[in-house]
Amino acid sequence: MELSPRAKERLARIGALSQEEKETMRQSNELDSALSQYFKGELSSEDLWKRLKTLKDRSGDPIVKEAQAKLVDTLRLQMAQPDFDQRRTAILALETMKREGKYSSLDLILNSIEALRQKYTQQKERTYQQLKSAVERQLQAVAQQAITQGLKLDVESSIEANVKNSPQWKQFISQLDSSSQQMFDSYIAKLRELI
C-alpha cells in the first residue's frame, strides 16, 4: 500500500519507528495472521496454541494477553454456537500458557455467557411461539371468512409477518435485547479484567 505524500511527510516529522516499535508491530501482525487463519478454520486450537507459544517464547507474555483480548472482542450475544465454542476453546487454551493463569475463573465466566446466550434464545423462541399461536388463531378465523367469500389467504406467511411486526414482539425484543446485552457486556468486562 502506497502512503499519501501527506502521510509520508507526517512520518518524516515523527521520525522512524524504533526497533522495539517495529518488533511490536511485526508481532501484532503475526498474531493477527494466526487468528485470521484460526477463524477461517485453517488452524485448529492446538495449532493456534503452538504458533502463539512460539511467538510468546520470542516476545513474552503480553502477546498471550493481546491474543485473548482480540478473541474476547469477537464474542457476541447472537453468534453461531460453533463460532462461540471456537473462541471459548482458544481463550482457555491460551490461558494455560500463563504462569499464573486464571483458567477456572475464565471458564466460569464463559459458562455464564453460554447460559445467558441459551436463555436469550429460549426466551425469544418461547415468546415467538406464544405470539404465533395467538396470531394463527386470529388469522384462521379471518381465512375462514375469506374462503366463504371466495378469496384465498396465505395464512403461513401472514402469521410470521404479523408476529414480527406486532407491537408486542417489538417491545419484547427491545427489552430482551437491552437486558441481555447489558448482562453480556458485564461478563465481557469481567473477562477483560481477568485477562
Image: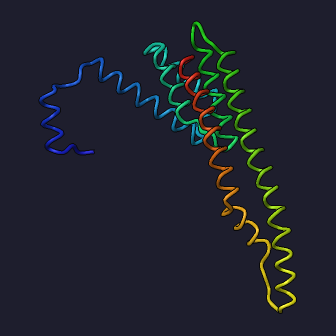
Toward the viewer: 107 or 117?
117
* Image mark count: 0
Q: Position of residue 143 (x, y in %)?
A: 83, 80
Toward the viewer: 32 or 192?
192
- Determine the residue positioned at 16% across, 38% down: 8
Q: Left or right: 36 with respect to 149? A: left
Q: Left or right: 54 with respect to 13? A: right
Residue furthest bottom as drawn: 150
Residue furthest top as drawn: 100
Q: Position of residue 78 (x, y in %)?
A: 64, 44
**Quarter of the view holding residue 40:** top right
**Quarter of the view holding residue 135:** bottom right
Toward the viewer: 89 or 72?
72
In the rendered view, would you say 184 is above or below 79? Answer: above
Q: Quadrant of the N terminus?
A: top left
In the rendered view, would you say 24 is above or below 60? Answer: below
Q: Left or right: 32 with respect to 80? A: left
Q: Left or right: 169 with respect to 74? A: right
Q: How is the image coloured?
A: rainbow
Q: Position of residue 122 (x, y in %)?
A: 78, 44
In the rendered view, would you say 100 is above or below 16? Answer: above
Toward the viewer: 119 or 51?
119
Q: Position of residue 84 (x, y in %)?
A: 65, 36
- Determine the residue positioned at 66% across, 59% down: 167
Q: Quadrant of the C terminus?
A: top right
